[in-house]
Amino acid sequence: MSVQVAATVARGEFNLRVDLSFAPGEITAVMGPNGAGKSTLLRSIAGLQPVDSGHVSINGTVVDDGDRILIAPELRNVGLVFQDYALFPHLSVLENVAFGPRSRGVSAGQARINAQDLLDRLGISELGKRRPAAISGGQAQRVALARALATSPAVLLLDEPMAALDAESKVAVREELHIALAEFTGVTIMVSHEPQDARALASRAIVIENGRVTQDASLDALAQDPATTYVAALMRSTP
Amino acid sequence: MSRTSKRRLRTARPWFLLLPGAVALTFLIVPLIALLSQAPWGSFLQILSNPAALDALRLSLETSLMATLVALVFGVPLAWLLAREVLPGTRFWRALVLVPLLLPPVVAGVTLLAAFGRRGLVGQWLYNGLGVQLPFTTVGVIVAEAFVAMPFLIITLEGGFRGVDRRYEEAASTLGASAWTTFRRITLPMVWPAIVAGTVLCWARALGEFGATITFAGNFPGVTQTMPLAVYTALESDRGVAIALSIVLLAVSVTVLVALRGRYLRSGASA
Amino acid sequence: MPTATITVSAAASLTNVFPAIADAFRNKYPQVTVKFNFGGSSALVTQLKAGAPVDVLATASEPTMWSAYNAGLTSIPLLIAKNTMAIAMPSGNPARITGLPDLAKPGILVGVCDTSVPCGVAARDLLKLNNVTVTPVTRELDVRSLLGKVVSGDLDAGIVYTTDVKAAGRSITSVAIPPNLNVTTTYPIAAVLTSPNSTAAWAFVRYVRFSLSAQGLLRAFGFTKPW
């Protein structure tokens, strides 16, 4: 299971142009200033943003060739955790997590059993019946993760997973994420602008500035040998 | 009782809002009270047991419900298309959808005749080719009511659909839901309050429709004479009957609105 | 004659002829402006009873006028014209109507006025007089709407006034009804007693009834003598 993105996406003021490969089992952090194109990269992989030229491949299958081939998100087997989780407000937590499998044809009963199982594994088993409005930010983050994992995706994309949390919750959630991601065998790509998250969770870091990849290496390499002033400032700001 | 519960913040009931608001309330309520006061209560039951009156009521309820159903089946998709700006020239189509709202109802009836009358643009094909004629039929009543009432539903729902963050639909698609599943399980439930509000508005408008109905479908008891037509016809000869029928129509409408008020209308079109 | 504006409530079937009469009236009394309020006769009387500020009332039936007179609202009415009935068909007469009996044929779409308006009463009496049973598809609330649906071709035939046939000209085809088998409606006119412009109101009433111009116009539009 691997992901390849060698494409250009026009984004208003500038283009995102990348040529990246991701391997299964690898957790990559994508960092960069706001508006650099990080979310665009995730959305292109998920199928929510078509590329203008080039291609996106998942497991060797071209899902977007910038021309005729454009496979819809529902057929791509990609899990996406949104920045503010986008939990369906009118469904219970359990139904949220069961939604993906049910949409893919799993029976309601079986989907709910699997969903409860996931909730157990993420330490939020008792939240099943609650509505998203009635849970905390940290809990919502785990529900969103469970929901994305429930479909056994080949690729897991996390868009600023900790951005909506307060400092206290971040520490706890980082731990939980670390455990959950360690069990995941597919490709994990996580957008974050905080190097702490990258350090805690990722083995590889990519920095995107103005639509181009400015550095793609391990976190130590970024700290010891920053390629740009932005990277240097970024790595300096962490304890 | 403590002092705090008797005192109120001045800002909670400002006079410059209370006064005009009270005037508006009075303006809307006084005609209703006047209607009730002039009703022929003595002969009320006798008037209502007249088969023509019952026919009119039955016809009104049937046609308004059917018109609302038609509006839902075709209006919900159109509202979605307008909200998502799928069609080229969305602004133009949106304005066009509002036209039946602006037309005087009789004019709406005239345009319907021009379109669906026996010699109408579409009507002539229906008549000459299929032998189908819409004027003077109950189906014609449903067409007239749907024409004037559907825009209410579409406008209300478009606002509702716009209020649904696209991210929910995106999340659903990444989870594997087809467009239909997303619409059915995510989008529609999230606009439910707008659907209810729009449906009620649409139904109320259809129920009260007069000008387009009489111009397009005509006036015949049991077939096309809905309550508003019956009231107007009675007005020519017996005002008491007209008032009695008006009160029945009013009672039916108020009952439905009150029944729905507490649960749905309060949240209005907000998701 | 003081300067005045008078409002005349007149039956719908007078919609074409009365403005022409008002123009002639203006020539004689330039200081009087005539405004019209056309509608179904019963509706006009209802409005008057509810206090509408009207100066002259002209209806298409005697019973409606008597209703206003008996309520003490008008002066004694004068009869100004008579009207008879005719059958109007869309131009080209697609349903091949040749007389009243044809209206009873199955599948023919016939329109009449509702019996709550004078035109409808006349139609009902006409059919009864001629022993024809017709199930109309619509009972319109005023003869103009009925005529409109004949012109547009949505009805195969409509029972309307002779004056309507004349006014519609080429847009319809018509069949006349022999006088001995026809129903006549009479048009009374009266001044409203509560009018603040009684001089002008009375002048108009008398003008319509007695002047050669007005009666000539009525004849030209298809009305017959009131006596």
Image (cartoon, helix red, strand yellow):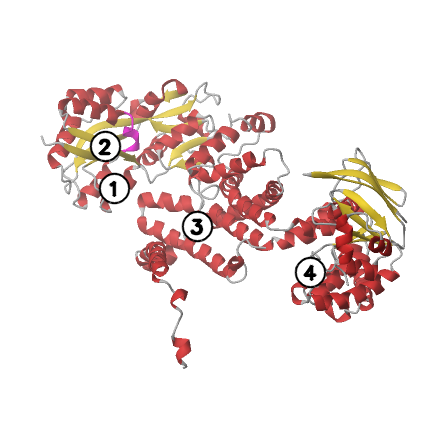
Which of the two residues, C216 or A148, is positioned nearer the viewer here? A148
Region rendered in magenta: C9-16
Alpha carbon of mark 3 to alpha carbon of mark 1: how far? 27 Å
Looking at the rendered structure, the kind of residue marked 1 is: Val
Q: Is residue B225 visible?
A: yes
Looking at the rendered structure, the kind of residue marked 2 is: Lys
Quarter of the image holding residue C32? top left
Looking at the rendered structure, the kind of residue marked 3 is: Pro
| Subunit under mark 2 | C
For residue B51, the mark is 3
Residue C99 part of the magenta segment: no
x and y percentages locating residue C144 in the rendered image: 36, 30
Alpha carbon of mark 3 to alpha carbon of mark 2: how far? 41 Å
| Subunit under mark 3 | B
- Crowd rating for badge 4 (residues with CA inside 10 Å; few <14, some 14–19, many 20+): some
Closer to the camera: disc 4 or disc 1? 4
Alpha carbon of mark 3 to alpha carbon of mark 4: how far? 66 Å
| Subunit under mark 1 | C
Disc 4 is placed on an element classified as: loop
Which of the two residues, A194 or C27, is positioned nearer the viewer here? A194
